[in-house]
């Protein structure tokens, strides 16, 4: 390993996502053979004290209190963007134009316009060998990667139904505090972009089909929440009696969708989809669920039981049934590098696998997936959902 | 029991529903104390041979090849309508006007107009002591009846989310035959009215709130199917090479919904809902699912595991979790009259309980539930779904 | 059906089992084509008032306050024994010797000696065309019957592990009353014979292999319970402050077992088994569970989800997994005569199927299964379990 | 963190367990505040090439080809023993006597004699401030740690039943190779010590009660297996046609048990237990399951769904039911230091938590848990199981 070239990383932001990314950079080379060895060169943030503590905790070698400095440094090869969505475009474009590879958290941006600019810059950069990727880390859950493989292998036949739910409950308490995730100017949208975006990306990626149109309903159940105070993590309980500020994003997003057809001649329509994203489903903690029904079989996934994939193979009828595949076999995606069969992985492994795929692509000089263009497509769906919701749920083409 | 007055029943139709209803009429008095004892007096149908065989098999004492004769007979107190939806209005209205109580299978009718006429006649009849009920038998599943009780008792708080799926797969085979259920002139609609109607009724009944508007998407995946041939049951495989006829109903129905608010002053909106009904979800056999998320708790049900109800009580946090209540305790709805705890019931028990509730109401001279008016409300939702789907999913008030 | 010969039934006992058997006799001919039509001719019991009420409720045409009268009657073809185990031998032997067919509830008797006598009488009677069966009704659960078929078809290969649990909790309350089931002189044993016997029968029947030896541990957690008072059903709460009497049976039975080998030459040992029966497993209501692991696959069943069978097919590795077969397809045992796929059955259907199989065998003049000899083998296992438990768990051959 | 004193670790062995331990040493300080910072100072093994590769891969700073050298080094504070059981005693005793803290993989040794010596040495060392721990890492699964807390808090009442299974299937293939785990001289026993030991430790730890006696049955299904060849991981498929050698350990271990009573006066017996460990349960990949039934409630766990714990609270009857607690709340053991609620952990987190607890204890100068004495008690149960199995399953006191 000593002779392998390093990949020197500079990370912007060090909250929840920063912790997950740091772990991934540290851990990926310990379990996978990588063409480049990641180095945790520098982390950037505005609060010098918090930044230094985070750097020490997560293992970063140096700090910068301005992300622009990070981009100026010669000893950094890749910028990893872990900040709220409103900052993505500026940082990513600056980094790419400075010749740094970029890993950008999802959603790619807060608007289609930003995402389009980022994609144009990314495509130009790619021609110069500067590569970029958007962090839809759920793609790297072994069970979802297996689902993708099974669909690609034709084991579901032609897909008819896409059924996606992303259910959480950490905002169910009406006194949970007004964090940046509830401020549209920072987060772009609420459950739609935060968690619904994962569902959209997973559905399009696994089926290999783009969403072509939607009809949507958005709802904000709790219109005002407590401001001020310090809090950590996603949930918490703000001061119920103090001042309140407006929630400017959706609490829940519901939409139906159509996907493009696999038939180039338009002989048949593509699948229809139904999506729900909410942070008010009491008891559902991180139920990122996806079910696909095809002409030959079905798959079903729930992140709350993330190490398994349910598969129904109609060829086995009448003794068929959804079978719970423990996605921990050596032949399954990513799993050979971990533990024996049946010894499951956790949430952070998706980030480690993301690093593996990104570094492997950079090593090979190939476009990582999902590209900014893929993420732009998700952004367009998010925008169509908002447009339909603003227009009495009328059908909106993407 | 010998001194209890009889309730003499005449049933129209003797297919799948006829078998279930016959069993219920026979069985209800064996497990429940009823104010009137049902007698299986006569069954009507057009095919004399099939009719006689069915009468003998199911235990009916006489037959009529014209349902009008059934209504003319003096020795019949109640007409039980088990025929396709296009015949409901004529039979039910004639029966009620002849002074017979009526039990009518769902959906009440094939159009709102018919349902409105039936409801008007039913309300007039009720004033003369002639009672009527629509057969939304799923209400009588103990687990759903317990769900209703828990919502009524305030254990979920204010409902925010309604999540309803009714997933089957018996039409997934593109060569399954073109039965009357796929002919709009007979069935009114496809998965929407056949199974989606159950979801709508259950959601409105359990929440106690009416759907006020919808946005919908309907899809017919298989446009033509084999005609002719004999087949039994719902599924089957027609002659793949023979002539085909058009499917004139929806194969799948997806819609979002809003419910009325519990706040009379309009201070807060009511719950939002998301509904899906399909007969193309490979591997899902009879997955009639309903989940409600409130401010204090959630419930979740799946008919494929019909003897249990999942309940999440937020008051138990942080050690909360969905708990699987086996709905077989003596204190649960209907179950004290059956077996010891843990010994589950089956599909047909819903029909037996329906007879119990109907006969009990008739004995007490009270309006049974669901009334034709309740069923008319479901019919209006079905119509709004179709109207929205015909109008680019635009929001449609009910 | 009018021309079909009747099978005139006389039932002894009318409690929990009597209700289940009555339903089965009434219902079987309504859903299945039988060679003989059961008639509910007479029911016997000692309490004249209770008996008359039960006869009326359950549909029996006459009553006898002495079971001997039942056997003397010419108009009765079959005696159905639903009384506690200490009465089985006398009634069954008298009935068989009087030329009546017999259906006897399980366990067959309270001792091996009684069971041996009954079996000898039954075998002699069979030569005269008088048939008998023991009521191990769980065999008629469609999922377990499918399990049997799959093992017979070789889909599990050679069985290595048998894992059986029968977990209930209705005695967990130390103040539950001292019923006849806790009195060894009436019931023979506790959880061992009441529910463990079902596990033993199912394991032997499905594998086709007899238990050859056991090592056991029995335990009585609650040594004294309230006496007197009326109670219904299995559980209940006696008077905590009143007099108490001794529990003379086991509360829980644990044992390991060996089964005979399929290799006649003794080349390999048979499967090993582990069994547990208890009525103190809080939260487990009727968890009659059976898992078999073979060289090619595994099956797993839990009566609390009785309409499904889990099957693992090693040939599908590495994408294998336990698949949940909804045992409601037309090709599955018994299910074609009921409802469409996915519409589950309940506890009492096992009794209805038992009547179907018994009447079919009688119609054909063939030995019904399980025979008294089969039930005697179960009795021998029960006796070996008690002997081992009495002898410091030392291995005891059956 | 720069000022925190280091804990310099020397690890012996670098296979499956070595990889897991290395990850834990690296990762623990990144997520938890520790009183000492682990340093991966040196790793020892016999194969110089494999050793160097492993050191580089896993992040160890130096290597030693003789574990004795590791113990001689001044710059090492703790010896981490990840080798087969037959080497534990010699290494652990040497290390402790040299003043090094010790973490020793389970089972502690291959015989009670060895374990007793190790325990004596450990107790003497502890008086000199040299501490030791045995690696029963499953204790650090958050769900099992929560189970322990709930039992300690009295939420189950008095425990009556312990039901433990550890089911795997990686030896089900009769051609899987003859690894050291199947050689009694190296591994001590088969499934009994490898996986059954985890069940015994977990059961004793969570209930707080020792096993006092057992009755056991051991079985070796496949008596000979292919020798030679290289293989990685647990399973694999050896050369079916090559030479074979004898399997000298058990393939499956079944036993019943009694636990000590919580009543000092012997007023009531303690719980009874039933245990099964096998590597032949086709389809069960790592099903380490534990269920406890008490007088007030029950808990149930399955490592295949390791992020949840099922809990039944009898106080909630009649609407009780096993509730699936997602053990990912900030108040649950270990989880506050990881991800938001609902974002699960994986197999290796148990090892990271083990390091956290060990380093915390060393920092505080307190005895870590489980001590060698705790592990000796497990060893005694293992020995009693073998003794009973060798003596016709006769009861054997521990």
Image: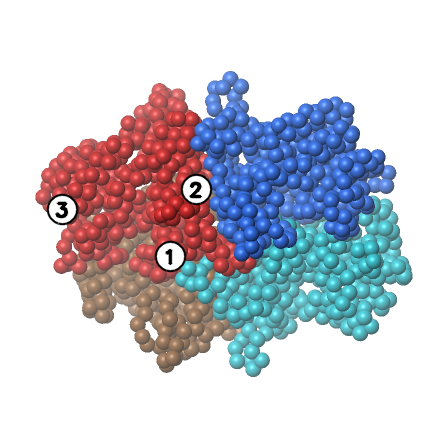
Chain colours: A cyan, B brown, C red, D blue
**Residue name at image x 64 percent, y 43 percent:** D329
Relative placement, left or right, of A5 versus C87 is right
Q: Where is residue D160 in the image (x, y as percent from the top left)?
A: 48, 30
Chain of the residue under the numbered disc 3 shown in the image: C
Q: Mark 3 to mark 2: distance in Å?
A: 39 Å
The residue most toward the front is: D243
Q: Do labels 3 and 1 share a chain?
A: yes
Q: How crowded is mark 2: few (under 14 residues within 10 Å), some or many (20 or more)?
A: many
Q: In this view, does A345 lie above or below A264?
A: above
Image quarter hosting the C terminus of chain A: bottom right
Viewer-side residue, A55 vs D319: A55
Residue corresponding to mark 2: C272
| Quadrant in which residue D166 is drawn | top right
Q: Where is residue C259 in the image (x, y as percent from the top left)?
A: 39, 42
Q: Are marks 3 and 2 on the same chain?
A: yes
**Residue name at image x 66 percent, y 30 percent:** D372
Viewer-side residue, C185 vs C13: C185
Chain of the residue under the numbered disc 1 shown in the image: C
Residue corresponding to mark 1: C153
Viewer-side residue, D72 vs C139: D72
The residue most toward the top is: D265
Disc 1 element: loop
1 or 2: tag closer to the N-terminus? 1
**Residue name at image x 62 percent, y 67 percent:** A204
Q: Mark 3 to mark 1: distance in Å?
A: 34 Å
3 or 1: tag closer to the N-terminus? 3
Q: Residue C128 carries which label?
A: 3
Relative placement, left or right, of B81 versus B300 is left
Q: Do labels 1 and 2 share a chain?
A: yes
Chain of the residue under the numbered disc 2 shown in the image: C
Q: Which mark is residue B351?
A: none
**Residue name at image x 45 percent, y 50 percent:** C294
């Amino acid at each position: 390993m000593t002779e392998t070239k390093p990949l020197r990383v500079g990370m912007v932001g060090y909250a929840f996502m920063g912790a997950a990314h740091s772990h991934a950079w540290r851990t990926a080379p310990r379990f996978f053979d990588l063409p480049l060895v990641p180095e945790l060169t520098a982390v950037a943030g505005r609060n010098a004290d918090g930044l230094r503590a985070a750097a020490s905790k997560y293992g970063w070698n140096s700090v910068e209190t301005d992300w622009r400095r990070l981009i100026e440094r010669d000893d950094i090869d890749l910028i990893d963007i872990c900040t709220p969505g409103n900052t993505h475009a500026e940082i990513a474009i600056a980094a790419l134009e400075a010749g740094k590879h970029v890993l950008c958290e999802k959603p790619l941006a807060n608007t289609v316009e930003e995402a389009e600019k980022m994609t144009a810059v990314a495509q130009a950069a790619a021609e110069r060998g500067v590569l970029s990727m958007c962090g839809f880390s759920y793609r790297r859950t072994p069970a979802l990667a297996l689902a993708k493989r099974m669909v690609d292998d034709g084991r579901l036949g032609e897909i008819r139904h896409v059924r996606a739910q992303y259910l959480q409950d950490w905002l169910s308490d009406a006194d949970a505090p007004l964090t940046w995730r509830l401020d549209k100017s920072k987060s772009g949208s609420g459950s739609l972009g935060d968690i619904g975006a994962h569902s959209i990306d997973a559905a399009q990626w696994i089926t290999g089909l783009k969403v072509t149109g939607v009809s949507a309903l958005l709802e904000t159940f709790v219109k005002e929440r407590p401001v001020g105070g310090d809090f950590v993590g996603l949930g918490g309980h703000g001061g119920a009696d103090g001042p309140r500020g407006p929630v400017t994003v959706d609490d829940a997003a519901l939409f139906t969708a159509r996907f493009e057809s696999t038939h180039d001649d338009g002989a048949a329509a593509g699948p229809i989809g139904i999506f729900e994203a909410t942070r008010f489903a009491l008891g559902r903690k991180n139920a990122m669920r996806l079910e696909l029904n095809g002409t030959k079989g079905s798959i079903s996934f729930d992140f709350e039981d993330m190490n398994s994939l349910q598969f129904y193979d109609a060829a086995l009828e009448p003794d068929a049934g959804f079978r719970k595949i423990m996605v921990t076999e050596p032949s399954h995606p990513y799993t050979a590098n971990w533990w024996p069969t049946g010894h499951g992985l956790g949430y952070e492994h998706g980030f480690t696998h993301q690093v593996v795929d990104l570094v492997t692509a950079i090593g090979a000089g190939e476009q990582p997936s999902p590209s900014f263009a893929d993420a732009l497509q998700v952004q367009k769906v998010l925008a169509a959902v908002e447009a339909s919701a603003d227009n009495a749920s009328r059908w909106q083409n993407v």
